[in-house]
Amino acid sequence: MSGITTIGELIERNARNYPEVDAFVMDGQRLNYAQYAARVRRLASAMERLGLRRQDRAGIFATNCIEYFELYGACEWAGFVLALYNFRLAAPEVEWLLQDTQPRVMFFEAQYAGLLEGLRARHPGVEHWVCIGGPAPAWARGYEALLAEGDPAGSSFRSRPDDYCYLNYTSGTTGRPKGVPTRHSMALTV
């Protein structure tokens, strides 16, 4: 990938070179590369407006959905770090991960609102809760409403090659799961 140093640059390149090609087809939804890049930029801007800065963490607790990949893209584009939580985890495990990663914003699917509502009070560092799909509970904002608040040009931040882009967790077979950060430069070589 000559000249590409971040995944955000790869998103932009794909939007330029393959604007009408499907990037995602999932559960009856289609998103081409141009649409994906546009939504990624808007979401990155909306996240900046929530107060996130480069290398701040956002968490996600959801099954595979297009919004999941848009959040990947927004973090990759703007230099935020996406902490990935396995939706199969029980409340005590999620609570430990919230404490360990300390995300400033937490994205979650509506079906997990009950589990996360019970954890909110113990994690005041999570400044914003964003609900994907379904009606958002009173204590969270809706994903599409947040997206609509973003600037189409994107955030003022852009990722850098040495920025972290993801925080994955090991299975914890020898104790608690361990966070494994991934940099853009490493993710591009995979």
Image (cartoon, rainbow, N blue to C red):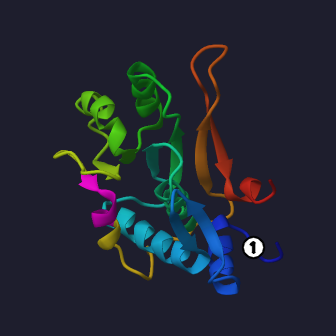
Amino acid on which disc 1 is placed? Ile
Few, some or many C-alpha atoms within 10 Å of disc 1 (few <14, some 14-19, many ≥20)? some
> In the displayed structure, would residue 78 be above or below residue 118?
below
The residue shown at (46%, 49%) is 57
Magenta residues? Answer: 141-146
User: Residue 95, position in %: x, y?
Assistant: 39, 26
**13 is within the stretch colored magenta:** no
Q: Which residue is mark 1?
A: 4
The residue shown at (31%, 72%) is 148
Magenta-colored segment: predominant secondary structure: helix
On screen, residue 181 versus residue 189, left or right, reads left
Based on the displayed image, in which of its 4 quarters is residue 168 positioned? Answer: top right
User: Residue 91, position in %: x, y?
Assistant: 38, 23
> In the displayed structure, would residue 142 be above or below residue 60?
below
On screen, residue 82 versus residue 4, left or right, reads left
User: Residue 31, position in %: x, y?
Assistant: 54, 71
